[in-house]
């Protein structure tokens, strides 16, 4: 999936119209441009976003549970304490965005790219990720417990205290990750591809998980 670097490069850039005002429950946002707006505790449960752009916005405590997001392009935005539980994302991208304390359990992401993003304490438990790319991101205390990661990759990214307990990985590519630090779920790496260097780094934790005692003498 090719991600445009500039707003003007979006295939639907000429169709965008500025949005003002709060978000609403089951709101329908088609070709809307959210620019330098602040959304605090807005309730937009079940809202639909199609071919939208989000630039330099702040979302605090907003409720976007079960939102449907298709072809959304976001950059320079911050999400804090936002609920994205059971939301559905397709063909979208987030660049240079910050997500902290975001609840995204049960969400579905298909062909989504996160580039130069920071994810801190994001809950993705039981989420389903298909062909998702985390590029040059920091994922700190991100919970993938019981999630399904299929065709997911982490080029240039760092996983710090990530949780993979009871997660299912299929064709997940971790070779490009700069660091793989798991709080739990080493056994869930079955189905992932890692490099030889990463295997050597993970060997002690994998041995401990499998109950292997390593002694040279």
Image (tube, rainbow, N blue to C red):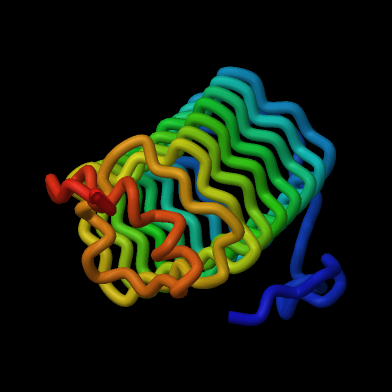
Q: Residue at x 40, y 60 (%)?
A: 109
Where does the N terminus fall, quadrant-wise? bottom right
Q: Is residue 6 left or right of residue 173?
A: right
Q: Which residue is painted at 73% across and 41% down in the image?
A: 77
| Residue 176: quarter of image | bottom right
Q: Is residue 198 left or right of residue 14?
A: left
Q: Position of residue 88 (x, y in %)?
A: 38, 54
Q: Position of residue 170 (x, y in %)?
A: 26, 71
Residue at 20% from the left image edge and 53% from the top image edge: 187
Q: Could you tell whether 201 is left or right of 13 in the image?
A: left
Which of the pair 161/115 is nearer the observer? Answer: 161
Camera-nearest residue between 170 and 50: 170
Q: Is residue 145 above or below residue 141?
A: below
Vertical order, 111 against 162 (above or below): below
Across and down, in percent, residue 192 comes to: 32, 69
Using the rendered view, name the quadrant where residue 123 is placed.
Answer: top left
In the picture, measured across the screen, residue 158 lies left or right of residue 88, that is right
Name the residue at 64% across, 53% down.
137
- Residue 32 seen in render: no
Q: Is residue 204 above or below residue 63?
A: below
In this rendering, the answer to whether 44 lies above or below 178 is above
x and y, in percent, of residue 151 in the image: 37, 74
Labels in figure, total: 0
Residue reaching furthest to the front: 217
Q: Residue lying farthest left?
A: 211
> Can you see residue 69?
yes
């Amino acid at each position: 999936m090719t991600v445009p670097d500039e707003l003007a490069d979006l295939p639907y850039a000429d169709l965008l119209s500025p949005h003002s005002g709060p978000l609403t429950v089951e709101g329908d946002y088609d070709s809307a441009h959210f620019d330098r707006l602040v959304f605090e505790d807005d309730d937009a449960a079940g809202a639909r976003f199609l071919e939208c752009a989000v630039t330099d916005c702040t979302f605090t405590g907003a409720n976007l549970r079960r939102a449907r997001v298709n072809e959304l392009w976001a950059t320079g935005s911050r999400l804090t304490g936002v609920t994205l539980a059971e939301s559905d994302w397709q063909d979208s991208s987030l660049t240079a965005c910050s997500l902290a304390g975001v609840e995204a359990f049960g969400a579905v992401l298909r062909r989504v790219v996160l580039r130069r993003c920071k994810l801190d304490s994001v809950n993705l438990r039981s989420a389903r990720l298909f062909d998702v790319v985390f590029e040059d991101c920091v994922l700190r205390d991100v919970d993938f417990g019981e999630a399904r990661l299929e065709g997911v990759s982490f080029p240039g990214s760092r996983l710090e205290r990530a949780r993979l307990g009871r997660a299912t990985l299929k064709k997940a590519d971790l070779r490009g990750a700069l660091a793989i630090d798991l709080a739990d779920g080493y056994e869930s790496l079955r189905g992932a591809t890692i490099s030889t260097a990463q295997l050597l780094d993970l060997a002690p934790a994998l041995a401990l998980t499998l109950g292997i005692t390593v002694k040279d003498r």
